[in-house]
Image: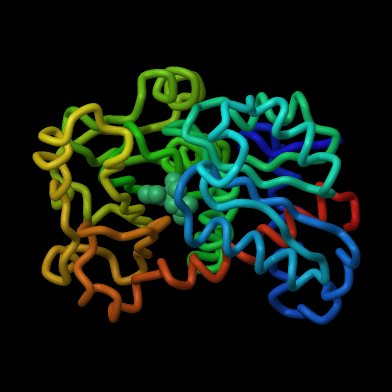
Amino acid sequence: MRHMIDIAELSLQEIDDILTLAKDIIAHPEVYQDDCNRKKLATLFFEPSTRTRLSFESAMLDLGGSVLGFSEAMSSSAAKGESVADTIRTVSCYSDIIAMRHPKEGAPLIASLNASVPVINAGDGGHNHPTQTLTDLLTILTEKGRLDNLTVGLCGDLQFGRTVHSLITAMARYGNVRFALISPAELRVPGYIKENVLEKNNIPWKETEQIDEVMPELDILYMTRVQKERFFNEADYIRLKDSYILTTDKLKNAKEEMRILHPLPRVNEIEYAVDQDPRAAYFRQVQNGKYVRMALMLKLLGLR
Ligand code: NCD
């Protein structure tokens, strides 16, 4: 039985298979509409979510299956003190596949060790978010036509942004990919990612606090929100929250073919006027999220 806890568990071939399947689902949704007939997805969300939970649920419904679950920890027995291990043993009795989001890093891994059905990490604290990365990869592939030979700028909260950690881990495996890490000094990419992913694999990367400095080089600009819920004090959050605000003016220096991604939710880091720019791909990215999750669930359930 396979789980999806960390994007590094997938080989490049498996990622390619998922993206290829997602593209086929986009082209021929009717072929897949009954694949998950009588299958149940449980969504266990111990942290807020709009896109991830609803895209998982919409994905299962479009595959002909059904969904159950909870969208806040306080409405589950976690509020009474139940452990993740016991919750998962229970939910394994009632569902065929589980998508779980949790504020504690590693909670979905613990869940997978105690589950009798596949567990998907839908975001664990400031750690990983592999299904957002599959979404990002499908978006980059459809927008740019390739996943190699790209200069990728990641901007914002690179310390706590779990989507950033998973995306760097995945993109670093494609040929001739280089990174520009744009953040305030306090919110830089964690050392373990620099050492274990970037340095270890000789990936070209640089750090800067100035987005304008690297804008002309970028093929992808991945904007992120400052992760308020991970801060220890509000004063630091307030000081850092508006470090980067992407405006139409700042985009004047960017390539015509650059694409702007954002996992969303946006707070203040992209001005609304940017949405009209053809380079803004973040709402197309949202749409892709459903299709990669359909493809991933079909693979984990052994149905395709
Ligand atoms: C992201 C997350 O939850 O990590 N959202 C998402 O799943 N699309 C990004 C964020 O919350 O900033």
Residue 142: x %, y % from top left: 56, 67
User: In the rendered image of this protein, does residue 211 appear above or below residue 128?
Assistant: below
Relative to 204, 68 lies left or right: right
For the C terminus, give its image quadrant: bottom right
Relative to 101, 25 lies left or right: right
Question: Of residues 45 and 31, which is closer to you in this image?
Answer: 45
Residue 303: x %, y % from top left: 90, 56
Residue 212: x %, y % from top left: 14, 52
Question: Would residue 82 be visible to someone looking at this image?
Answer: yes
Question: Of residues 25 and 290, which is closer to you in this image?
Answer: 290
Residue 50: x %, y % from top left: 48, 61
Q: Residue at x 22, y 38 (%)?
A: 183
Question: Would residue 150 be visible to someone looking at this image?
Answer: no
Q: Residue at x 44, y 26 (%)?
A: 198
Question: Of residues 68 and 265, which is closer to you in this image?
Answer: 68
Q: Quadrant of residue 292?
A: bottom right
